[in-house]
Image (cartoon, rainbow, N blue to C red):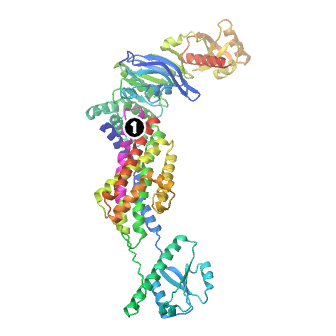
Amino acid sequence: MSRGRLLGVADKEVRSILRDPRSLGVALLLPLVLLILYGYAINFDVKGLRLALYDPDPSEASRDLVASLTRTGYFRVVAALPRSAEAERVLERREAQLVLILPAGFAADLAAGRPVSVQTLIDGADSLTASVALSYLEAMIQDWWVRRAQAEWARGQPPVLIEPKVRIWYNQELSTTDFIIPGLLVVILMMLAALLTSQTIVRERELGTIEGLVVSPITAGELMVGKLLPYVGIALADVALIAGAGHLIFGVPLRGSPGLFVLLTFIYLIAALSAGLLISVSTQTQQAAYLIALVSTLLPTMLLTGFVFPLSSMPWVLRALVQLHPATHFMVIARGMMLKGATLAVLWPRALALTGLALALLVGSIRRFRKTL
Amino acid sequence: MKGPSAIQVEGLTKRFGDFVAVDGVSFQVEKGEVFGLLGPNGAGKSTIIRMLCGILGPTAGGGTVAGYDVVRSPERVRERIGYMSQRFSLYLDLTAAENLEFYGGIYGVPPARLRERKTWAIEMAGLAEQQHRLTGELSAGWRQRLALGCALLHEPEVVFLDEPTAGVDPISRRQFWSVIYDLAAIGVTCLVTTHYMDEAERCDRAGLVFGGKLIALDSPEGLKGDPRVGAILEVECDPPAQAVEALRGVEGIRYARLHGAQVHVSLMGREDAEQRVARALEARGLRLLRAAPVRPSLEDVFVSLIREAEHAGAGGAA
């Protein structure tokens, strides 16, 4: 590997990039726009759910329960139903998203220590909202009951009391933003890096400048690495922008070691940029390369690497396959380091897999280039 | 390791599937020689050059360039050759000077030497005032000379020029050839492909490629004496374009074609051919001003040999 030849390629690539400030601007701004757009849009937090109430036997106890539900802001009562049969109507017209049906004699049963059952009907058409709403509602009723029981116990009436102790670590508010932003970093970098390099070789092929390269003594390795270097710079700038914006706008922290984070991000970028190169040496037109890079990085990265859908719910074949995707490993690394302050002691298998994949992709693109001479 | 000739080609063959692009081509080019490859588009000239540059593997046969085997050590070959492709292969978004620097870089020319060579190339291409303009803004002639400069920066022993003057104005072409002669004078071997006959005349030797085969190889004068080329009758007639029409398909005439203001008629036998020409023209009411046998031009050789090769090919197939 000759340093002079490698730097010659890198130098030329930098000049070409700087001559095209519009593309450079897109490369630097697009990630920010995507981050802000998706950061706000992909949000599974549910607030202000429309609740209809059927309370045939209003009491101090039932009013207290409803008040504790609405106080948090997660629910607001939109209707008090005269009959329980009305429930179907309000759900159907989407006037309410859920209906809480209290039994007759709610307060009396509670006071007597008899089992009380509270029925909830939920519009399951939006299953995501429904399951979130359901878990909120269950937790809040439970919480209300526990507090009430404690108060009674204090007054000297010992009830049978089971208090479930559920604690949430790391993302105490279970905020989806904290969960989404590191994932977005992974997805956006993959797509952007692959798009950047996907054009490099195929453009030379389209313009005919590739001939000048292949008859020169430059080796495939020198050419590929030389092409890669300038884009590593651009992509690292994007990392700084995304991580900075994630912190400033969405308040997502970086709890792990910044040095390690930069190193692992660098390895991930090599993998993503090499994937773009591999696409670039395998295609004949810039358009095809662009489309393949977009489709092959964006969809699998969003859907299969644990960005939104957990790997644990996938069939084992798919779960095994996505281990070959660099983003699967970097997803764990990025979330672990940003939210939990994870160290190499925990992350080393992921770091190792990521490094292996990055090398494989880079070597693959070099090999593939030689073949097409 | 070192072969005696600058280029030595033996039985070079390239097949793409069923299509035979290059078919058993053999020739030698001596050091400092200007060697031309002539032939219509698609004849296989570029494929030959690509195989000699080591960027395309031959199906059979092989050769040496600057003493190195093009199949076994293509990287050694690449260090010693300059190549100017048929397609324009410079970066339009770089300036002329930056293109030179880039090619100097990827050929590993040391920085101090590169400065000298860059100055030389800019002067040779007449680009002193244009060197900081983007290549995309330069005219075709300038671009081609810049491409030549890029191909020569690392002082190659052998230079391959694939249709270097295609689409270039006559003055630029003349300048181009004067650079080629300068190179030959200092011992650089030049292999040039062209379909301009006047350029073929400038070569020390020229090979005619047709259908992937090398069908003739000699000095321009030697080619004109090729026994396969029949007698040529130069006819002055008014108007000449209609004469070509009138003579088409006449018995005893291989072909008639415009040659400047005259018509060159290739005759199959000598005896009554002139009378046949006269009669055919009269029948169309065209005035024959003058008819005289002439020595064939290179274009006559070119057309005759290709006709013959086509006939041989058709005969072989039948």
Q: What chain is tagged by disc 1?
A: A
Q: Quadrant of the C terminus of chain B?
A: top right
Residue A270: x %, y % from top left? 37, 49
Q: Determine the secondary structure under disc 1.
A: helix
Q: Is residue A24 visible?
A: yes
Q: Residue at x 64, y 23 (%)?
A: B241
Residue B22 is covered by the magenta coloring: no
Disc 1 residue type (three-letter): Ala
In this rendering, is residue B139 above or below A342?
above
Q: Is residue B47 left or right of residue A147?
A: right
Residue A58 versus residue B21: which sits nearer the camera? A58
Residue B136 versus residue B274: which sits nearer the camera? B136
Q: Residue at x 54, y 15 (%)?
A: B297
Q: Quadrant of the N terminus of chain B?
A: top left
- In the picture, residue A3 is in which quadrant? top left
Residue A123 versus residue B30: which sits nearer the camera? A123
Residue A247 versus residue B130: which sits nearer the camera? A247
Q: Is residue A47 visible?
A: no
Residue A274: x %, y % from top left? 41, 46
Residue A222 is covered by the magenta coloring: yes
In this rendering, is residue A285 above or below B109?
below
Q: Main secondary structure of the magenta part?
A: helix
For label 1, the crowd category at 10 Å Cα-Cα, with few meaning under 14, some 14 to 19 and many 20 or more, is many
Q: Residue furthest right?
A: B283
Residue A367: x %, y % from top left? 42, 38
Q: Residue furthest left?
A: B112
Q: Residue furthest top?
A: B271
Q: Is residue B260 left or right of residue A21?
A: right
* Residue under pointer 1: A220
Residue A284: x %, y % from top left? 51, 41
Magenta region: A212-240
